[in-house]
Image (spheres, rainbow, N blue to C red):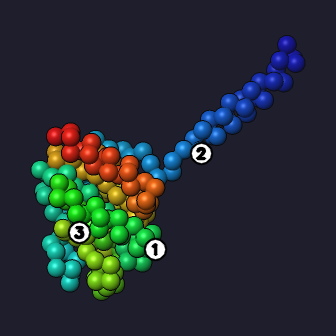
Amino acid sequence: MRRAAVFIPLGIFLALAVVFFFRIGGDHTVVPSALIGKPAPQIPLPALEGAKVGGFDPSSLKGNVTLVNVWASWCAPCRVEHPLLTQLSKDKRIRVVGINYKDQPANAVRFLTQLGNPFAAIGTDGDGRAAIEWGVYGVPETFIVGRDGTIRYKLVGPITPENLARVRAEIEKALAAN
């Protein structure tokens, strides 16, 4: 009996090691969000001054499948993902909007002038409060919102050639859902 008691801690350790191994080995861009399946935050944001598009109006999420991208000019991965956002914005079945996070307006406009503006609307989140409501961990992050205004998908990190097919598949699911 005493010998069996020696193996109990070893068994617990091995069980935990297996759990940690499988959790750590997963896709880190897919982060469970408490907001999936819930209405998108209803926080209007003012337009990015000089961007020549309107601000972020949460009521515009209803009736459209919308890709919401949280970005900043100081964010290097945002610059990398920008051509793919531009590519996605050419799909007329969806609306691509941006939330500019804790950025200087002049820098954000310069970023868009250099790389192009894929956004139909851009809201300015200078203090980061809207990002908190959206459950943002850091920039960039992308959400897909269904026609009913609920969040369908969240991608943490940049859209890349490696995950673009998954983003497109989630867009297709949202388009088919309503």
Q: Is residue 24 left or right of residue 62?
A: right
> How many residues crowd mark 2 within 10 Å: few (<14), some (14–19), many (20+)?
few
Q: Position of residue 46 (x, y in %)?
A: 19, 72
Mark 2 belongs to which amino acid? Ile
Question: Tag 3, which secondary structure?
Answer: loop
- Give the mark nearer the N terminus: 1 vs 3: 1
Q: Quadrant of the C terminus?
A: top left
Q: Is residue 128 above or below residue 33?
A: below
Which disc number belongs to residue 119?
3
Mark 3 belongs to which amino acid? Phe
Q: Is residue 33 visible?
A: yes
Q: Position of residue 170 (x, y in %)?
A: 31, 46
Q: Nearer the viewer, mark 3 or mark 2?
A: 3
Q: Position of residue 31 (x, y in %)?
A: 44, 48
Question: Tag 1, which secondary structure?
Answer: helix
Q: Is residue 101 left or right of residue 160?
A: left
Q: Quadrant of residue 148?
A: top left
Q: Which residue is disc 1 drawn over?
A: 76
Q: Is residue 20 above or below residue 62?
A: above
Q: Is residue 154 visible?
A: no
Residue at (38, 51) in percent of width and height: 165
Residue at (40, 73) in percent of width and height: 79
Q: Which residue is disc 2 drawn over?
A: 24
Q: Quadrant of the N terminus?
A: top right
* Residue at the right extreme of this rendering: 3
| Marks 1 and 2, how far apart at CA | 25 Å
Q: Is residue 77 left or right of residue 147?
A: right
Q: Quadrant of residue 68?
A: bottom left
